[in-house]
Structure formats: structure tokens, C-alpha cells
Image: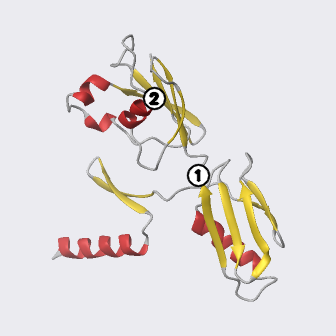
């Protein structure tokens, strides 16, 4: 009975909050928001229905502050598309009765990761919300014969701090310790020594 109630509650949460991901960490259930966060360089189109003057295509600048008619400057750092839509709608309600606001992500230019070191094509690569290390190594043309495939490093900036994670390609290739093959995040750097 208790398990059934928990299952029903989880289905309700997933249904209501489609951008949430359930994950298990050390036998604890964790709910994470995996919706796309708008980042610098992304191209957005913001429009208000029935008002051509309130339609604008915007490239998000490095500081994350965009300007839109009537509402002025707005810091959108850390927001997803629906959050930005809600903020713009709330600010426009001072000027328009019940505005219908649409925010579209035209180009997710900020969703990139980097591969450097002993790979065949080092560089910056566009990633998705579920690109893992094996996939980005493939995008980089694989490792060259001199690569130390047991000592790959992933650098990540998290809450203002640099985090270093290790990745052993040989173990993952054999089907061992697959948890190393993590999902990359915006700005991650994969170093192949």
C-alpha cells in the first residue's frame, strides 16, 4: 500500500513538473531540474501576440541581461524559457491587459563543451542535455595513438568552484564502471593527456 502511494505521488510529480528528472544517489531519491537553462550566446525570439512592435530576436549577452520594449533590462541568468516567459508577461501586465507572450529558443549556442589534448580533432563542440564523455570523444575524432586513455580528466565549474573528475576509457570500453561516463554540462572541458 505504501509503495503504491509513493508511485502515484511520483507519477503526479513527473506529470506536473515535466522538466524534473528522478535520479538515485546513494539509495536516496533525488529530483533534479533538467530543463534547458538559457545561456550567453543563445538566440531567443520573444513576441507578444497581436503586437508587431513587441517582437524581437535577441542574442543573450555575456552578462545575461537582455533588453525588451516597455520592460527595459532584465537579468535572465539561470532561467529556462518558461521562466523567462512568465517574467516578461508579469512585467508587461503593467502596460497591457493579459498579454500572450511567446519565448522561443532559436539557437542554443551556449550549450557547448571542449575537448583538448591527444584527440584527432580538438575543439569546441555543441552538446545536448544528454551528451556523455564517450560521445564527445567520438565528436573529437577519437583519441590518437599516444593518448593516455586511462587518465582522461573532466573539468567542470560548479557553484563558482572548479571540479576535477577522472575518466578511464579502457574500463568503460570493457563495460566496467560505466558511471564514469557522465553527462556533460555546458562549459565542461575534457582533457585527454
Left or right of residue 155, residue 150 in this image: left
Residue located at (75% from left, 75% from top)? 91
Q: Position of residue 80 (x, y in %)?
A: 58, 61
Left or right of residue 169, residue 20 in this image: right
**What is the C-alpha distance between the residues marked 1 and 2?**
20 Å
Q: How many marks?
A: 2
Left or right of residue 13, residue 57 in this image: right
Location of mark 2 (residue): 140
Residue located at (44% from left, 25% from top)? 153
Location of mark 1 (residue): 108
Q: Nearer the viewer, residue 166 or 181?
A: 181
Q: Position of residue 188 (x, y in %)?
A: 52, 35
Q: Position of residue 26 (x, y in %)?
A: 28, 46
Residue located at (45% from left, 50% from top)? 129
- Which mark is drawn over residue 25? none
Residue located at (51% from left, 24% from top)? 122
Q: Nearer the viewer, residue 36 or 59?
A: 59
Q: Most extreme residue toward the top, as rendered?
A: 146
Q: Position of residue 111 (x, y in %)?
A: 55, 46
SS assignment at label 1? loop
Left or right of residue 167, residue 171 in this image: left
How dense is the environment of label 1, judged by Cα within 10 Å: few (below 14), some, or many (20 and up)? Answer: some
Q: Most extreme residue toward the left, as rendered?
A: 1
Amino acid at each position: 500500500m505504501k509503495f503504491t502511494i509513493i508511485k502515484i505521488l511520483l507519477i503526479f510529480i513527473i506529470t506536473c513538473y515535466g522538466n524534473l528528472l528522478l535520479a538515485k544517489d546513494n539509495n536516496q531519491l533525488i529530483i533534479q531540474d533538467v530543463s534547458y537553462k538559457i545561456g550567453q550566446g543563445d538566440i531567443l525570439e520573444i513576441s507578444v501576440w497581436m503586437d508587431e512592435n513587441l517582437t524581437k530576436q535577441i542574442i543573450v549577452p555575456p552578462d545575461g541581461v537582455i533588453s525588451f520594449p516597455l520592460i527595459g533590462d532584465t537579468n535572465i541568468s539561470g532561467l529556462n524559457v518558461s521562466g523567462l516567459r512568465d517574467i516578461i508577461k508579469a512585467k508587461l501586465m503593467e502596460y497591457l491587459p493579459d498579454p500572450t507572450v511567446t519565448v522561443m529558443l532559436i539557437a542554443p549556442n551556449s550549450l557547448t563543451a571542449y575537448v583538448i589534448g591527444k584527440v584527432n580533432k580538438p575543439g569546441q563542440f555543441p552538446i545536448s542535455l544528454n551528451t556523455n564523455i564517450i560521445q564527445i570523444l567520438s565528436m573529437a575524432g577519437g583519441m590518437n595513438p599516444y593518448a593516455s586513455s586511462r587518465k582522461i580528466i573532466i573539468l567542470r565549474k560548479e557553484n563558482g568552484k572548479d571540479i576535477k573528475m577522472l575518466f578511464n576509457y579502457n574500463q568503460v570500453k570493457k563495460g566496467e564502471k560505466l558511471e564514469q561516463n557522465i553527462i556533460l554540462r555546458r562549459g565542461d572541458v575534457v582533457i585527454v593527456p
